[in-house]
């Protein structure tokens, strides 16, 4: 097996374990801030997953989708953080 594929499979397994851990923190988190951070982590992990899918399929358009998703996620986290801090 090619060493690049082995590394990518290991990265995929780590991404899936990261998703499970972030979901656990999102569900179990005692405070709202914990849930917001877990949600932001889930978006970052999903962007990494989109990049892996783009590499496996050889389609660059998925990277554009990941970039837009990252910008929207950043905006959403900023809005939620301002709401938690002092309300809108």
Image (cartoon, helix red, strand yellow):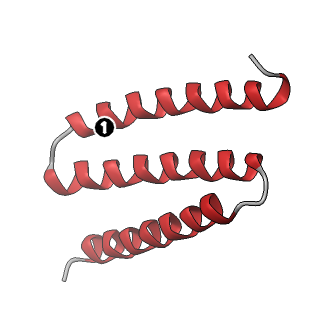
Q: Position of residue 67 (x, y in %)?
A: 40, 32
Along the horizontal axis of the image, is 18 left or right of 47?
right
- In the image, is 57 to the left or to the right of 4? left
Q: Is residue 2 above or below residue 44?
A: below
Q: Is residue 33 left or right of residue 4?
A: right
* Secondary element at image label 1: helix
Nearer-the-camera pick, 68 or 20: 20
Task: Name, please, the residue furthest toward the bottom.
Answer: 1
Name the residue tied to disc 1: 63
Q: Residue at image x 54%, y 63%? A: 23
Count how many numbered circles sit on residues in the image: 1
Q: Residue furthest top?
A: 88
**Residue found at the far right of this picture:** 86
Q: Is residue 75 above or below residue 70?
A: above
Q: Quadrant of the N terminus?
A: bottom left
Residue 40: quarter of image? top right
Q: Position of residue 56 (x, y in %)?
A: 19, 57
Q: Position of residue 83 (x, y in %)?
A: 74, 26
């Amino acid at each position: 097996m090619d060493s690049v594929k082995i590394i990518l499979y290991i990265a995929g397994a780590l991404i899936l374990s990261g998703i499970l851990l972030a979901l656990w923190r999102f569900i179990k988190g005692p405070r709202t801030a914990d849930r917001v951070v877990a949600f932001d982590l889930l978006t970052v992990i999903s962007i990494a997953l989109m990049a892996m899918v783009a590499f496996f399929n050889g389609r660059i358009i998925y990277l554009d989708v990941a970039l837009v998703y990252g910008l929207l996620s950043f905006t959403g986290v900023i809005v939620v953080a301002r709401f938690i801090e002092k309300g809108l």
